[in-house]
Amino acid sequence: MATAQETHEYPGELNDVPGWFWPLDQVLFSWFLERQERLDTRGDLLELGAYLGKSAILLGHRLRDGETLTVCDLFGAEPPDAANRAEAAKSYSSLTRQAFERNYLSFHDTLPTIIQAPSSAVVDEVAPGSCRFVHIDASHLYEHVEGDIGAAKSLLGPDGIVVLDDFRSEHTPGVAVAAWEAVLNRGLRPVCLSSQKLYGTWGDPEPVRDELLEALRGRDDISVTVEQAAGHRLVRTRAKGKRLRPPSLPASRHPAPAPTGSAG
């Protein structure tokens, strides 16, 4: 995330919520979560860094009975150190918990579990091994991302999926260092890459990677290539123009009225 985007109106659809959750990643999130449902993989969902709720709303759409979505964000609270304060002032000045809650409740009956604190607090609030999907999109500073990745590793169950945002953006070198360090030295196994996110697991990546390849190669709106790097097979994905077919998305309580025809 580079700069803040403000929101004042109730969103009529998911893509009315400000944020940098691109359609390709909406497709990939949905595919991974639907696969977990198909295999009856149980567990909670966790998001570190929620901003105004765009990806959290989709995650909440995939919850099943007995599962919990937890989001952790400062939501305007005092950051833990000077570098984090500078980052928050530059990129997230419009972020408020009220705006997040308004957006989320436009699509869901109840709020997720909210931890309004630095992401380091999550290990005290979420049980080890209890999650099946973790999205990391909090601070871009190396020291914080390194800690967030360590937290995800301890909180995910076997074959759980972790998603690292901004692993390749020019303004977030700390995320890139932490992400590839985790791949090279901390056992993280990449499954696929989008333009913004790295999807990986500490379990066996081959079954999920092969299923994903088969699913994506059946689509004409997503380009797929496979590369080898440092002993890892990397699936690279890219949207083909504006033809991307969206996944099933949650419906807003405030849909925009249908356009009316002009009088004859």
Image: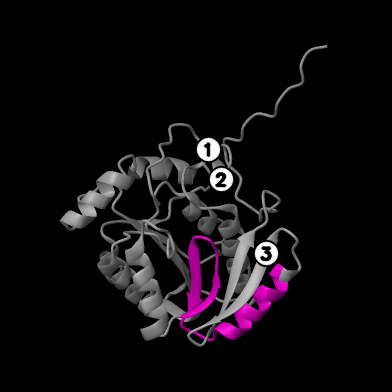
Return the mark for residue 201.
none
| Residue drawn at x 73%, y 70% as measured from the top left | 217
Q: Quadrant of residue 80?
A: bottom left
Q: Residue 109 at x, y = what percent? A: 51, 47
Q: Earlier in the sequence, mark 1 or mark 3?
A: 1
Q: Which residue is mark 1?
A: 11
Please say whether residue 204 is one of the residues in the magenta stretch: yes
User: Would you say the residues marked 2 and 1 are in contact, meaning their CB atoms lie under 8 Å apart?
Assistant: yes
* Image vertical order of residue 253 relative to residue 147, above or below: above
Tell me the SS state at disc 3. Answer: strand
Which of the pair 77/190 is nearer the observer? 190
Which of the pair 23/97 is nearer the observer? 23
Evaluate whether residue 178 shows in this view: yes
| Residue drawn at x 34%, y 45% as measured from the top left | 97
Tell me the SS state at disc 2. Answer: helix
Magenta residues? 189-216
Q: Residue 5 at x, y = what percent? A: 41, 40
- Alpha-carbon span between mark 2 and mark 1: 7 Å
* Image vertical order of residue 160 relative to residue 58, above or below: below
Q: Which residue is mark 3?
A: 223
* Amino acid type of the residue that numbered disc 2 sits on in the rendered structure: Leu
